[in-house]
Amino acid sequence: MNFTRWSARFPGTQRRAAARTEHAAAQAKRGEGAVPAARGGRPDPGAERSTPAADGHPADPTVSGTGTGSGTGSGPGGSSGPGTGTTSAQRTGVLTAVPSLDELSVREVLGRLPALVALVHGPEHRVAYVNDAYTAGFGARTPGAPAHEALPELGELGLLALLDQVQRSGRPRTAKNRTAPGGGSSYTVTCTPVDFPTPATGTTAASTAEADAHHTGILIHLADVTDHAEAVERLRASERRQREAAVTLQRSLLPQELEQPDDLRIAATYQPGGTEAAVGGDWYDVITLGAGRTALVIGDVMGRGVRAAAVMGQLRTAVRAYARLDLPPHEVLQLLDGLAAEIDASQIATCVYAVHDPNEGLLAYASAGHLPILVRDEHGTVRRAADPTGPPLGTGGWLHTSGTIALGPGSTAVLYTDGLVERRGEDIDEGVAALERALAGAQGTPSVICDRLMRALGVDADHDDDVAVMVLQQPARAGADAELFHNAALELLGGIEAAPRARAFAQGVLASWRFPVELCDLGVLAASELVANSLQHGTPPMRLRLRRTDRRLIIEVTDGDDHLPRRRRAEPADETGRGISIVATIASSWGSRRTPGGGKAVWCEFALPDK
């Protein structure tokens, strides 16, 4: 195969060759000079020295302008003496032109390329040429054989279909990072269509049409990118390890098992973002506060990676500590806001903190820039928790406020992070509305509802953001199950005479609930001490409340004074100060808190014996 023939078929080569031919013809007509022969052709004796034009410039820029050391040159404006070695072109300041590209041998150029090069032609992609690098990489190839037989490596790299596509379209195509089977070298392959010479003049029309169908070819260029591919794989492996470390840290900081209050059924799920998304700082938690009350929290630290997960862990730990103070939701967020600014001033977080009180049938909450809680009542109506919503944690300078939403028997509430409802190109309110529709039709246990909401909102393993969802239900109990849950309350009116009424009330209620005699006696003693403490240190209105669940007995006394009692050691001569110590000794747990309307509540709990 004569490569100098088909090299002239590259796009643009014919136009340049025609231009040079016309230029040479004009020179010959004027007798101004001659063009050097191509490499391998017969030299032209008249081409050794250029003849300047009338203006002193060489007529053809490809003509050499360098004379011998003993030559003599002349031109307009003067002449050089013998032996000077200076040409007219040098005297006029014209640089000597470089050789033309057409003087180079295409075979020699391709043969010296370090990249692998092969040329195929015709519909069957028959081998026309392979360079030395290709032979060194894959071995010698038989010219004229089809590619699927002579170039099996192209099939292993999945390139035979690409050759057909280039053949049909006439456009170059590139395939990146094709790895040879067995984990060998990786190549970026470029396939460029080329034209072979058309049939000679004088052939029949039929033979010409057949030849035209076979005169196209494809130049295949394989660049070895193994080092680059290995570097990319090392980078991806490092990113995978970092992501796995972040996911492990994230999951270890989340509660391994949710606390299950007596009055609620709770389930939560966490789904990290897909492999292309870094792990965020979503978290949730359930904290039992005592006296049947439960704190629920869900939040999202802005940012990605280990840093966001570490900040999330610190905030979650702080929430649990602040929750033990039994503060109103907005006060907990105020404390978290200051802590978040101390942890990292550049890291902000959104959060919802809510407290469920079974006695009131309410969910009190405060939000720091987080999405609204959704509640579906027993009739299937879905409502959003209204404002108040303050700015995210870590911004500072804002006083959060609390709100309430009803959570009665048969109700279901959903707390979630923005990954569940936020989509690129869509308003987030549209995602919240879609979640409302999904919640309206979701039935079953909290864990089942979690799964259904995730599927309904399109969250899967390739989701682009991490998602946390918490579902809580207030069961509607009936029959034998309802008999395990009772409430009884007594308003404490009058003065010290309220104490015996409280003891009699507690004795009658606990006996009606069929508690063992020992537990009844302990319950009456605890109620008496709490009432006496309230009568002595509190202010009206006062109230005694008894509550039983399937697992515990709760005794609570409220009054109008907001000074919280504390346990102290009473001296032998002291006549008071032993009531709280007695309650703390006989009860499973005890505590106190300030009530929203002003005042306080002091409570204790007794674990019920297993039946």
Image (cartoon, helix red, strand yellow):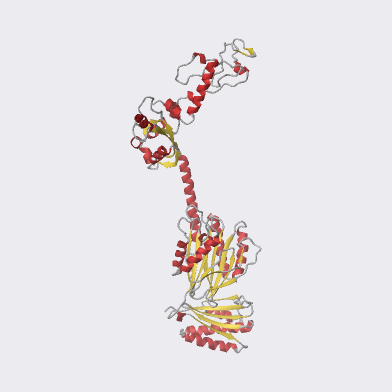
Frontmost residue, 511 versus 181:
181
Q: Which image quadrant is residue 196 in?
A: top left
Q: Position of residue 366 (x, y in %)?
A: 59, 68
499 lies left or right of 435:
right
Q: Is residue 536 above or below residue 52?
A: below
Residue positioned most to the top = 82
Frontmost residue, 28 versus 344:
28
Q: Position of residue 394 (x, y in %)?
A: 62, 60
Q: Position of residue 258 (x, y in %)?
A: 48, 67
Residue visible at 50% across and 64% down?
A: 435
> Image quadrant for the N terminus?
top left
Q: Position of residue 279 (x, y in %)?
A: 51, 56
Q: Is residue 275 above or below residue 94?
A: below
Residue positioned most to the right = 397
Residue visible at 39% across and 34% down?
A: 137
| Residue 16 can be seen, yes or no | yes
Count of numbered badges drawn on the protein: 0
Residue visible at 59% across and 63% down?
A: 369
> Image quadrant for the C terminus?
bottom left
Frontmost residue, 516 versus 29:
29
| Residue 33 can be seen, yes or no | no
